[in-house]
Image: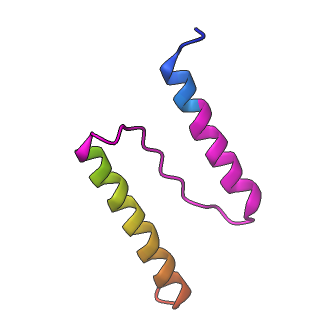
Amino acid sequence: RRRDQEAAMNYIRDMYKQQAMSHEKKTKSVYAHFTCATDTNNIRMVFSDVKDTVLIKSLQEYGVL
């Protein structure tokens, strides 16, 4: 159990979610992706989620959403 990869990933993801919730009164989106730098398809998904987050934040700031 000490080397349980899934448990470690869940622990790290939950730490980030808890951190996001404790610093803001409103809910923040947390996109959890576990990958290695050589997994190009997963890296594409990460960058897509980052672009999505930046776009939504900008549209909200300008009152479009």
Residue at 45% of width from left, 73% of height from top?
Answer: 54
Q: Toward which corner of the image does residue 7 lie, by quadrant? A: top right
Residue segment shown in magenta: 11-40
Report the front residue among 35 and 19: 35
Q: Position of residue 29 (x, y in %)?
A: 54, 58
Check the image and report above or below for 41 versus 57.
Answer: above
Q: How many marks?
A: 0
Q: Position of residue 59 (x, y in %)?
A: 46, 83
Per the image, is 32 magenta? yes
Residue at 52% of width from left, 30% of height from top?
Answer: 9
- Describe residue 42's horizontal placement relative to residue 6 as left or right: left
Q: Toward which corner of the image does residue 33 lie, by quadrant? A: top left
Check the image and report above or below for 41 versus 62.
Answer: above
- Describe residue 60's horizontal placement relative to residue 52 as left or right: right
- Describe residue 1's horizontal placement relative to residue 31 as left or right: right
Residue extending furthest toward the left: 41
**Quadrant in the picture for the N terminus:** top right
Report the front residue among 38 and 21: 38
Per the image, is 34 magenta? yes
Q: Position of residue 27 (x, y in %)?
A: 64, 61
- Judging from the image, the colouring scheme is rainbow
Q: Position of residue 18 (x, y in %)?
A: 69, 46
Report the front residue among 29 and 37: 37
Check the image and report above or below for 40 versus 57.
Answer: above
Q: Toward which corner of the image does residue 23 lie, by quadrant? A: bottom right
Residue at 48% of width from left, 45% of height from top?
Answer: 32
Residue extending furthest toward the top: 1
